[in-house]
Image (cartoon, grey):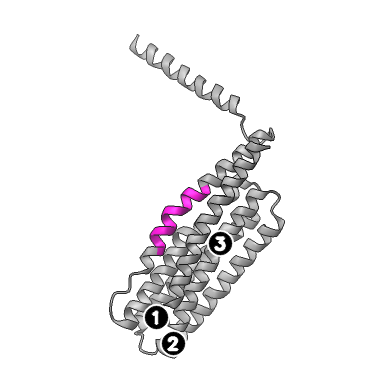
Amino acid sequence: MSHAAELPLWAALIVAFLLLLGSGLTLLGTIGLVRLDSFYKRVHSPTLGTTWGTGGILLASMLFFSVIESRPVLHELLIAVFVTVTTPVTLMLLARAALFRDRTEKNPEVPTFTAVAERSSEVVARGVNNGGTAEG
Amino acid sequence: MSVTILFWSVTLAQLFLAAAALCCGVRLFKGPRAQDRVLALDALYVCAMLLLITFGIRTGSTLYFEGALVISLLGFVSTSALAKFLMRGEVIE
């Protein structure tokens, strides 16, 4: 690590803090991936690694290379934007696929299509009644 | 001083990320259903990408950045393709 010898102490401290924050949050998210007990709970936990886990390590890398090369090195922003944009898309697609599989297998843990439709129509009817009484 | 701080923090961060990849491997191996395995694979992609960035800090070369970018691209494509497969496979059967 001789290339880091000219790094000032404040930059080293901030880089170390951001690295440990990012990697610790990523580890926490994957521990949740192992320990949580249903798929719909587990699908939340890796996002800890894709938000501040990635963010912390990318900020550390940006700060490190900017101070070492004494010019702004910002190309890590590309990964940050890409991960931020794609993670919700993939995980929502995966959760919808899992919900579809559970419903076609008539898994009792997830509400069926008809139950969801009945509940939403009940809510709509209640809303209409409440509106009517309020006006009357 | 700053070399020591940086060396130990990068080493510790790499150990944390390796442990995170190991947890993903456990879920990938154990996962009761296919969607759990796809989720673990997606988290494993993120861990590998972060590990490459910490290698870049350790060696001081920006070459690892391209590798990390390619891994994050492939992670998005593969996870969305697998999720689509899980849905379409059930529709056809």
Looking at the picture, does residue B21 appear above or below residue B4?
above
Residue B64 position, x and y percent, is: 46, 75
How far is mark 1 from mark 3, CA to CA?
24 Å
| Image quarter of residue A130 | top left
Whether labels 1 and 3 belong to a single chain: the reply is: yes
Camera-side residue of A74 and A9: A74
Q: Provide the residue designation for mark 3.
A: A28
Residue A46 visible in this rendered orientation of the protein: no
Camera-side residue of B93 and B76: B93
In percent of the image, x 64 and y 57: which residue is there?
A: A34
Left or right placement of residue B81 versus residue A77 in this view:
right
Dot 1 or dot 3: first in sequence order is 1
Q: Which mark is residue A94?
A: none
Residue B67 position, x and y percent, is: 48, 71
SS for dot 3: helix
In percent of the image, x 33 and y 70: which residue is there?
A: A74
Q: Quadrant of the C terminus of chain A?
A: top left
Left or right placement of residue B55 versus residue A13 in this view:
right
- Chain identity of mark 1: A
Looking at the picture, does residue A136 appear above or below residue B76?
above
Residue type marked 1 = Ala
In magenta, the rendered stretch is A79-91
Q: Provide the residue designation for mark 1.
A: A12
Mark 1 neighbour class, 10 Å CA radius: few under 14, some 14 to 19, many 20 or more: many
SS for dot 1: helix
Residue type marked 2 = Val
Residue A83 position, x and y percent, is: 44, 58
How far is mark 1 from mark 2, CA to CA?
8 Å
Q: Which mark is residue B3?
A: 2
The reply to whether the magenta stretch includes residue A88 is: yes
Q: Are marks 1 and 2 in contact (CB under 8 Å)?
A: yes
Mark 2 neighbour class, 10 Å CA radius: few under 14, some 14 to 19, many 20 or more: some
